Image: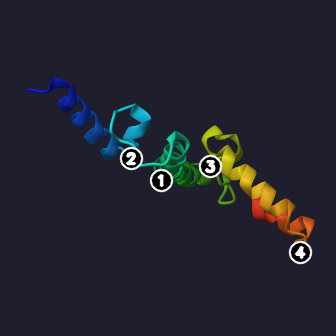
Amino acid sequence: MDFVEARNGAARDIALAFGVPPMLLGIPGDNTYANYQEANRAFYRLTVLPLLNRIATSLSLWFAGAYGDDLRLEPDLDKIAGLAAERDQLWTRLAGAAFLTDEEKRQAVGY
C-alpha cells in the first residue's frame, strides 16, 4: 500500500472541496497552474473573494437594521497581497489611457 500517495490524494480531495488549488498545499504532481502565483490569484478570485463578499453582504443586511439601509460593507481589495500584481497591471493600463479623464480613471479603480 502506498501510504504517501493515499495521503496526498486525500489532501487533494479536501483542498478541492474547499476551493483551494492543491498546488498551494505543496502536493507533488499538482502543477495544473502555470506557476504558484497564478494558483494564488485563482484561490483569491474563485474562493476567498466570493466568500468574503457573501459575509460582507450578510453583515451589511444585519447592521442595516440598527444603522440604516445606507450601510454597506465592502472588502478593501488593495490590501490583499495576492492580488497586487493584478492591481499593478490595472494601474499601468489606466496610466497609459490618455483618452480617459482623471475622474474616469478614479472610477475604474474604485475610488
> In the rendered view, does 7 fall on the left or right side of 90?
left
Image height check: is 45 above or below 96?
above
Identify the residue under disc 4. 99
Viewer can see residue 76: no
Crowd rating for badge 2 (residues with CA inside 10 Å; few <14, some 14–19, many 20+): some
Image height check: is 101 above or below 76?
below
| Residue 31 lies in quadrant | top left
Query: At label 3, which amino acid type do we have?
Result: Ala
Query: At label 1, which amino acid type do we have?
Result: Leu
Identify the residue under disc 1. 46
Identify the residue under disc 2. 19
Mark 4 vs mark 2: in front: 4
**Mark 1 to mark 4 CA distance (whole Å):** 32 Å
Mark 3 vs mark 4: in front: 4
**Mark 4 to mark 2 CA distance (whole Å):** 39 Å
User: Which is nearer the N-term, disc 4 or disc 2?
Assistant: 2
User: Which is nearer the N-term, disc 3 or disc 1?
Assistant: 1
Could you say where residue 11 lies in the image, as x and y percent from the top left? 28, 34
